[in-house]
Image (spheres, rainbow, N blue to C red):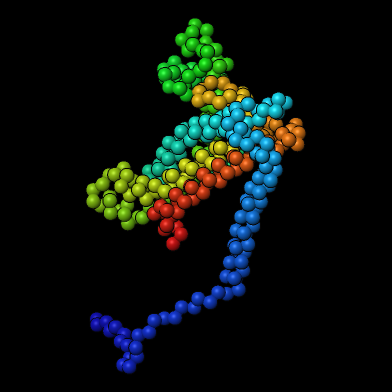
Amino acid sequence: MTTYLPTRPEGVEDRPRKLNRRSTGVDRVFAWSATAVGTVVLLITGGIGLFLLYSGFPTLQRYGWTFFTETEWNPEQDTIGIAAVLGGTVSVALVALVIAFPLAFLTALFISDYAPARIKGLCISAVDLMAAVPSLIYGIWGFWLLRPHVGEVAMWLHQNLGFLPFFQVKDTDPDAAMPEPLKYQGSAFLAGIAVAMMVLPMICAVMREVFSQAPPGEREAALALGSTRWGMVRSVVLPFGRGGIIGGTMLGLGRALGETIAVVLIINQAEILKPRVIETGTNTISALIATKFSDASEAQLSALLSAGLVLFIITLIINTLASIAVSRSRSGADADA
């Protein structure tokens, strides 16, 4: 059977097909709506920053740099500073990140490349469900379940890794016949564990989405050349998702810095600047604002809003850097394209 291909008539030239790029009414409505929503979000964010700056300016003007270097928060004696609570905020966030990052990384990698198809959806739903749990529940979980047992873990860390500054406990002998478990409860370490469970779903979701976008052609090429599954992940998926790993981790750090209610329920509040994360007593900026806000005078309220301004700026910077890291990665560039 002979097949005849259609031929172009003589005298007819090939012409590129004209594309109609004129926007319709629906396109214009969508563009205007998206622009309006983005503008409103930027205005709200900027308005919050300006409000905090305006409200906290009297405190910054009065105390100057002392507000950032003073460790005590004692309005009755006109001594106000955020050095201790800022250090506690960073300590809780770093402990949470150290715990959450490997768990989120391995979970995202398992879901994207190792989980069988029949359980992949279940794993995704389980991780997303963790993000839907209120922070109050995590705080209660940390107070009633973790608090009695994490003290034993902290004692073990003090006994075996006490030569490290952040695993030391002041005026406590880990080898004493009668240990003092209260010295290890209500610490930044305990609060960091609860916060880690809260930020883990966010970090995992970002990493999982980026890993799943790795080019299938490169995956298949690596496997066709004899690479193992781990070799393919190491040579294709991880380089492709480097920006997502960094961005997701920094987004988790930004959220960990601002967690409030769970931290308030778990820690023993104390304004002490110290690197010892397993020792009882710490405080964070968000916990300080939550506990002092209702009884604050006008001057104290200005000081609390100044502390909130510092936390707002730190979180904004971290989230901006995370967005830049994602946009400059291969996955972010492909998504923008």
Q: Residue furthest bottom?
A: 11
Q: Is residue 174 visible?
A: yes
Residue located 24% across and 82% down the image: 2
In this rendering, would 128 be left or right of 64? left
Relative to 117, does residue 102 appear above or below in the rendering? above
Numbered disc total: 0
Residue located 63% across and 36% down the image: 64
Closer to us: 120 or 301: 301
- Residue 31 picture location, percent across and down: 58, 66
In this rendering, would 317 be left or right of 67? left
Residue located 66% across and 49% down the image: 50
Relative to 1, does residue 302 appear above or below in the rendering? above
**Image quadrant containing the N terminus:** bottom left
- Residue 244 picture location, percent across and down: 43, 48
Closer to us: 19 or 320: 320
Q: Is residue 266 visible?
A: no
Q: Quadrant of residue 129?
A: top right
**Image quadrant containing the C terminus:** bottom left
- Residue 169 picture location, percent across and down: 51, 17
- Residue 41 picture location, percent across and down: 62, 55
Q: Quadrant of residue 82?
A: top right
Relative to 106, does residue 157 appear above or below in the rendering? above
